[in-house]
Image (cartoon, coloured by chain):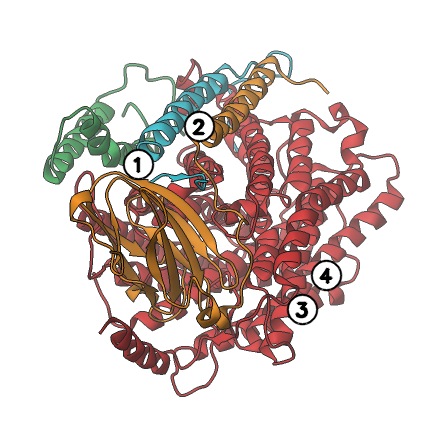
Chain colours: A cyan, B green, C orange, D red
Amino acid sequence: MTELEREIGHDEYDPIGTLALIAVYSAILVVMWLFMYFVEFLGNDLTVVGVIG
Amino acid sequence: MRISRAGLLVVIAIMIPILVELRTVLAYFSVSISVMETVLIGALAVGALVLWAVFPSTDTNRPNGE
Amino acid sequence: MNIHTYEKLWLAAAMVLIVGFIATITYGSVGVGVAMIDDSEATLDPNDLGEDERFAEPRVEHVGDNEYEAYVVARQFIFQPNPIEVPAGSTVTFYVTSADVIHSFSIVGTNANTMVIPGEVATMTVEIDEPGEYGILCNEYCGAGHHDMEGLLIVHPEDEFDLEGEE
Amino acid sequence: MSAYVDQFPAEARIVRAAFWSSFIALGVGGLLGLVQVLHRTDVVRFMSGADYYTVLTLHGVLLAITFTIFFLVGIFTWAITTSLDRGLENLRFTWLWYGLMSVGTVLAAIPILAGFVGSVDMSASVLFTFYAPMQAHPLFYLGLTIFVVGTWLAGADWFRTWLVWKREHPDERIPLPTFMVLTTMLFWYLSSLGVALSILLFLLPWSLGIWEQVNALLTRTLFWYFGHAVVYFWLMPAYMMWYLMLPKISGGKLFSDPLARVVFVLFLILSTPTGIHHQYLDPGIAEGFKFIVMTNTFFLLLPSLLTAFTVVASMEHGARQRGGTGYFGWLKALPWRDPIFTGMALAGLMFAAAGFSGMINAGMNINYLVHNTFWVVGHFHLTVGTAVALTFMAASYWFIPQVTGKRLWNKSVALWQVLLWFVGMTFMSNAMHRAGLLGVPRRTAEPQYAGFEFEAGLGSVAELDAQIALGGTLLFVSVVLFLANVVMTAVGDRIDDLPDNEYADTLSGADDAPLVLDNLKLWTAIAVVLVILAYTLPLLSIIDRGGVFGPGGGAFPMVAESLRLVVVAAVDAGVIG
């Protein structure tokens, strides 16, 4: 189906590109999570608190 | 072509979510742009990308993106 | 089973992410004091709301210094009472139940949002600081007129508020 | 090796039948999606608000249940027969379960469709979740039951085939595709038990008048016992495609067979004891139960995060074998011209975004912000609506030639189709998420209110509506292109030079996987224990509080709605006036 330029076996393959991509992804996740939780949610009005008394 | 036509299409498609959210992100830095300005920026960005893509490749022996 | 070092790294990072998420939520609950809708109120028969002293007459009651309780009935396709009126600078507890199907009681643009299930009473306490108006809507499909189901929460300036029936 | 249709001509027929059932549902469901998106955003309104809910019910049932499950029984049949290299044991039995699924779909669709006809006293505009005490016509519940029984028998068919294979190959590992099918079916049995109990014990007898009332919270909890796990029933076949197809199409091998097994085992044991996270805002369930379910839910992120790594690493392996280099430069070496690859890769990319909005949904208290808003609709159009649907469409470009023996009609149209889906979904889903944060509700025909307006922090609600309408329209065009392509393929001529029927090799193979991973009995037992732990106390508490049949309240058949509206309007006027 595809033309291979070279054969890469199990022991000689390090998925460094995947690690780089996924590091970027998790950085985005963390920033977005903090933003959503602390700015959009806790910064919003009328937060439901425990029943008084 | 520096990248294949299919590759170019994919890159343009992936630029769209970035452009759509550009206004929101800029707004948090107190930069407000209108819808028309966003469309304009988008058109410019895509135009630049296409120009870059159709420029003759410097590395002709590697048929990437096929 | 050999797992590549990078994938082990990611596995560890993923666990940190997961624990971090749970820790954030726990902080919201314990540190900030965000309470969940729970099972604190007993069940009741939705057909007999007329017999229930809280819901026979949906209303707002003044129960303490700055504390108010709102007894709200959601039914196809209205909220009672409407509008709900409270003063600014108060703590309001909503008791919401349904006379028919499942609804929601959601104060638009805020975190105050609960499901309303027939037979159950949802309780939700919020602190309201500023005067203003909030829309209330039902966000659970409840029948053909679902999109017409709305209400209003009016927060009056403290000195202009006068609850009906209070001297 | 040869094409699937030559290896298993009889099984190819059943796979074809399942695919066509699935595509019909996709076409009708997609059209209804367009109608809704235009109605909601007030671009084109040609029906009443009440009819909107009938359209929405049909859209939900056809796309979430019919389209997805018919497609997956097709590829599961392919996976079992291909990886065990043997046909199904008894094709009569196979056609029986296909027949039950078809009959069930038709029976459920009849009362929904009758909802459009005012003069027929039958309807089921109860949406995909059919929460009591809203009541549908008995035929609706009966149809759903028959459909689910059909899927149970399909599972039995695959298990039986595997057991026969196992007797002949006592010392061999379960081939990965078969392993994926079996683990998926095991949690499907476990989770669909909830909805089966809800329907057979309560809703069906109640709609027939045998019970007078039901416990709204109990039936709702039983629904969600099934309702969350069902999303993994849609998702696992998509994962299967990512593990088995993507590496191969990328020109590489699956990075790790053992980790793929770990992922499927984790889904088997964790996907069911999480359903209560759909009920964070339900009164009648203690906060403690909600917290426990939240921790389960967050740990369920793990198999998806692992999948992200394994699948991307497999693609990277292909890219590097094709000459790709650098930290990110290898991405250029991927076969972007191939619609099968591009569709699946973009589906995976959107699933990464869906993962984020899902994490927000899963957060117990942040759920206040988004619960039942348009945000949730944005979220699941990225999951089932893209990660699953786009993967299935892309996979079809490989499967349809395999099961028909014909050449794909037009590869360029296919590439445009998957790109159009990505762009359309970007507009629609993104705007839905943003609207949800403003408080715009889901499941609402006309979210324009008399007494208040939604406050958009930036731009306007009209702008978001425009994006949603644009996105929905592009998605519909994409569906049309897809259907045109598969139909034109099917009517083409038989060819002889089809690619062989095969799936990805592995870098780290099954021999590296500990034997215990193949111990399905053990994992099933753990899954059952976890479900008992997660659900016994909440269910007992609900029954203890409200009784098995609830504290009271009548049924609300979704019929003659217009009459009721008049009455309500009169009462309303009286109350307010």
Quarter of the image that includes the C terminus of chain C: bottom left
Counting from the top left corner in percent of width and height, residue D403 is at 59, 54
In whole angstroms, how far apart are the C-alphas of marks 1 and 3?
43 Å
- Are the two marked residues, 1 and 4, in contact with CB atoms closer than 8 angstroms? no
| Residue D429 picture quarter | top left
Query: Please, what secondary structure does the residue beneath circle 1 have?
Result: loop
User: Which residue in the protein does label 4 denote?
Assistant: D153
Query: Please, what secondary structure does the residue beneath circle 4 have?
Result: helix
Disc 1: which chain?
A
User: Which residue in the protein does label 3 denote?
Assistant: D200
Query: Please, what secondary structure does the residue beneath circle 3 have?
Result: helix
Kindly indicate whether the residues beneath marks 2 and 4 are on one polypeptide chain: yes
Query: Please, what secondary structure does the residue beneath circle 2 have?
Result: loop
**Residue type for callout 2:** Leu
Rate crowding at label 2 as few (under 14), some (14 to 19) or many (20 or more) other CA atoms within 10 Å: many
Q: Between disc 2 and disc 3, whose residue precedes? A: 3
Kindly indicate whether the residues beneath marks 3 and 4 are on one polypeptide chain: yes
Kindly indicate whether the residues beneath marks 2 and 1 are on one polypeptide chain: no
In whole angstroms, how far apart are the C-alphas of marks 2 and 3?
50 Å
Task: Give the side of residue C128 with respect to residue D261, left or right.
Answer: left
**Residue type for callout 4:** Leu
Rate crowding at label 3 as few (under 14), some (14 to 19) or many (20 or more) other CA atoms within 10 Å: some
Task: Give the side of residue D288 with respect to residue C29, left or right.
Answer: right
**Residue type for callout 1:** Asn
Mark number displayed over residue A44: 1
Q: Between disc 3 and disc 4, whose residue precedes? A: 4
Q: Nearer the viewer, mark 2 or mark 3?
A: 3
- Are the two marked residues, 2 and 1, in contact with CB atoms closer than 8 angstroms? no
User: Which residue in the protein does label 2 denote?
Assistant: D334
In whole angstroms, how far apart are the C-alphas of marks 3 and 4?
18 Å
**Residue type for callout 3:** Leu
